[in-house]
Image (cartoon, rainbow, N blue to C red):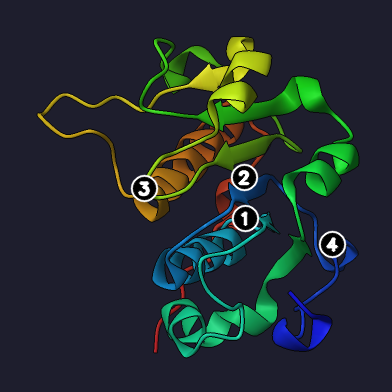
């Protein structure tokens, strides 16, 4: 992907305290990526998009799904998985989400600065990535007869659980939550 194909990035990582980082490995559906971007803005989280992609980041569907929040998103694009993996500063706090895992995400105490990694919509995370990080591959609870949750839904669930944990430990105060009304 050429730099001219990439939307202008939003705020820098330093513009507000970042709670988490969400990494999307080779996303295929722009609407999901846009919705995940909106979730990251709402949770003061950084978004990493790892290519190659199944769409152009300039796609109007991506902007539409992110509504007018895309300009507020802290994000970075990596051309490939190797460049993304070289950038990982705290691999021990990087968690991978897959319906194939046996370990539920409730069993982890999430912390500020954690990274949450999600795979392609059609196939999930690469097998070798899950094998190399098997101690940190987590599953969301799925009780009914579905293969898994939509990736945008899964990201929102993980962010809400991680924020809930921070709040229970007193790391986020009630006054940190904002209510927007028109």
Q: Which residue is drawn at 16% across and 34% down?
A: 146
**Nearer to me, 146 or 157:** 146
Q: Does the residue at mark 2 contact the one at mark 4 (Cβ under 8 Å)?
A: no
Reply above or below: 135 against 122: above
Disc 4 from disc 1: Cα separation? 19 Å
Crowding near pointer 1: few (<14 within 10 Å), some, many (20+)?
A: few
Which label lies toward us, 4 or 1? Answer: 4
Q: What residue is shown with label 1?
A: 176
Q: Does the residue at mark 1 contact the one at mark 2 (Cβ under 8 Å)?
A: yes
Which label lies toward us, 1 or 3? Answer: 3
Labels 4 and 1: the sequence-earlier one: 4
Q: Where is residue 32 in the image (x, y as percent from the top left)?
A: 42, 64
Crowding near pointer 3: few (<14 within 10 Å), some, many (20+)?
A: few
User: Quarter of the image holding residue 86?
Assistant: top right
Q: What residue is shown with label 2?
A: 173
Can see residue 7?
Answer: no
Disc 2 from disc 4: Cα separation? 22 Å
Which label lies toward us, 2 or 3? Answer: 3
Q: Position of residue 123 (x, y in %)?
A: 40, 40
Labels 1 and 3: the sequence-earlier one: 3
Q: Does the residue at mark 4 contact the one at mark 3 (Cβ under 8 Å)?
A: no
Q: Residue at x 39, y 44 (%)?
A: 154
Question: Is label 4 in a helix, a strand or a loop?
Answer: helix
For the C terminus, the quadrant is bottom left
Q: What residue is shown with label 3?
A: 122
Can see residue 161?
Answer: yes
């Amino acid at each position: 992907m050429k730099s001219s194909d990439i939307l202008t990035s939003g705020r820098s990582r330093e513009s507000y305290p970042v709670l988490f980082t969400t990494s999307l490995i080779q996303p295929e559906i722009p609407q999901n990526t846009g919705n995940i971007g909106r979730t990251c803005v709402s949770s003061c989280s950084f978004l990493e998009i790892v290519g190659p992609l199944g769409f152009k980041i300039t796609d109007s569907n991506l902007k539409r799904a992110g509504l007018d929040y895309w300009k507020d998103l802290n994000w970075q694009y990596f051309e490939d998985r190797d460049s993304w993996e070289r950038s990982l500063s705290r691999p021990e706090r990087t968690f991978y989400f897959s319906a194939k895992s046996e370990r539920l995400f409730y069993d982890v105490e999430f912390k500020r600065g954690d990274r949450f990694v999600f795979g392609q919509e059609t196939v999930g995370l690469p097998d070798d990535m899950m094998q190399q990080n098997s101690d940190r591959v987590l599953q969301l609870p799925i009780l009914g007869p579905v293969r898994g949750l939509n990736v945008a839904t899964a990201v929102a669930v993980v962010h809400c659980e991680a924020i809930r944990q921070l709040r229970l430990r007193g790391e986020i105060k009630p006054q940190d939550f904002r209510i927007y009304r028109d």
